[in-house]
Amino acid sequence: TTTTTTTISSAPTCVLDGPFFFNGVYHLFLQQTFPWSTVSSGGIGWGHLASTDLAHWYEISTFTGFSSDGFVPGKWLDPEFGNVSGYFSGSVTIVNGEPRAVFPTVFASEPGCAGVSSPSCHMEYQMSTPTNLSDPWLAEWSQPVTIVRSTQGPQPHSWVWEDPAGAWENPALPGQWLFIGQTTVNGSVLLTTWSSRNGSDWTAGFDYVDSFFPGTGDARCPGEACGGCCPSFVNGRQFSATNTSSHLMYDCGNTYWMGQYKASATKQEFVPSGIEQSIDAGGQASASKGFWTNDGRYIHFTWIHGGDDAAVESVSGVANASGWDSMLSVAREMQLDADLNLMTLTPVLELDTLHGALLYTNDSDTVVAPGVYPLPTVRSCVDSRRGGGGRTDALLAVAVSSRLTWSHAVIHSLLSSTSLLSLGPRQFA
């Protein structure tokens, strides 16, 4: 048997899709380019990784053929629009014990549509579900069905229906499901809210509700609306049971807001309690997504662009002529600092299983800056280089925080140098 191995590769934006936990397995989808693809020719789909411990990941989608892999353009011929050019970034929500993936599907069958980045193309929000829930890896998914059409919502909008967030149930109207997406209207980004027409039967479609994140007229949201690509509203769930301003909203701009969620039978609105904050330092993190686990943790992943192509290739060892290859952070838990009403990020405890013997302990009193201590040969927190024997040396500038187990600088170091997923061969139990 001949096996073709492709690289889990990311698009320039919004590359992380639908992480979720189901029946003891963590699942993670990524934007994937294929051997026949270029940046502009289409062929963009979802790669699929799975893990039982958040530390060791297995590639479910090797894309050796269409018969056993999902979300590959060309696998399905849409009954209404024909050929599919690509599946862009989306999310997965568990509804009535069933994972449901929602994503923008690009159709390039119209005259004048070239590749996947042309105003002559159009997108529909579509949904797919696993075909075999008894398969722990959920390798097979159903042919997508349209749930939102490009002709719906505010008009005229750009040709793009992008980045639907994970759905949640309307607290003011039990049984109605909601999700937000992103488009552009009159040159401005708009976060659109969509509600299910027939409760949990999503095949009946969704209707447009309103702008989810309207402007406040002050520094919290000075424009007509706020939020950007890859929006995530964390499932209508507060991070503190006693703080109504502990709802979390974040987007691909590496920014987040804490605020209130106002829900009614006819309107949904996020009202920030303060100005936007940064998720990660350094400007290399973007397009993050997360999910709630059964034990109440909110697990967060983010996409990391390595900067220039040479830097990315030095870490990944993969040629990156197209500029599409990049990295993914380790799994991190997001928690609310109740005193500051700010979010903190901590690598998940499961990553301890990857630790080997202690390599170095600094017992000196040398201080680089207040709270910052040197490690041997460290030059900067973003300095990664290939060591002898094919080994990658991660050179970290570690900051010590008296308040947090992992400080922001440590997290940034992890993002910049040691954040590649631990991938194993394709395995099935």
Image (spheres, rainbow, N blue to C red):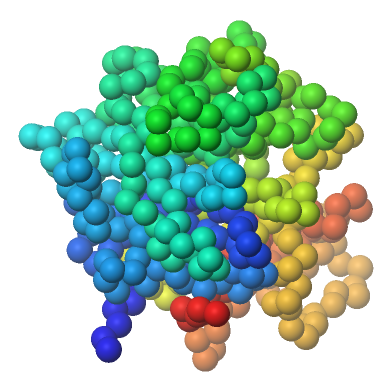
- Viewer can see residue 202: yes
Q: Residue furthest bottom?
A: 389
Q: Is residue 406 left or right of residue 103?
A: right
Q: Is residue 52 left or right of residue 360?
A: left
How many numbered marks, from 0 up? 0
Name the residue at 69% across, 77% down. 354
140 or 208: nearer the viewer: 140
Name the residue at 69% across, 56% down. 332
Q: Is residue 9 left or right of residue 330?
A: left
Query: Could you tell me residue 314's position as x and y percent?
Result: 45, 72
Query: Could you tell me residue 197's position as x and y percent?
Result: 46, 24
Q: Image quadrant for the N terminus?
A: bottom left
Name the residue at 48% across, 27% down. 198
- Viewer can see residue 40: no
Query: Could you tell me residue 7's position as x and y percent?
Result: 37, 69
Name the residue at 27% across, 66% down. 66
302 or 414: nearer the viewer: 302
Q: Residue furthest top?
A: 217
Image position of 362 with respect to 204: above or below: below
Image position of 163 with respect to 192: above or below: below
Query: Could you tell me residue 240's position as x and y percent?
Result: 83, 35
Q: Is residue 34 left or right of residue 190?
A: left
Q: Residue furthest left?
A: 111
Q: Image quadrant for the C terminus?
A: bottom right
Q: Give the quarter of the image for residue 412.
A: bottom right
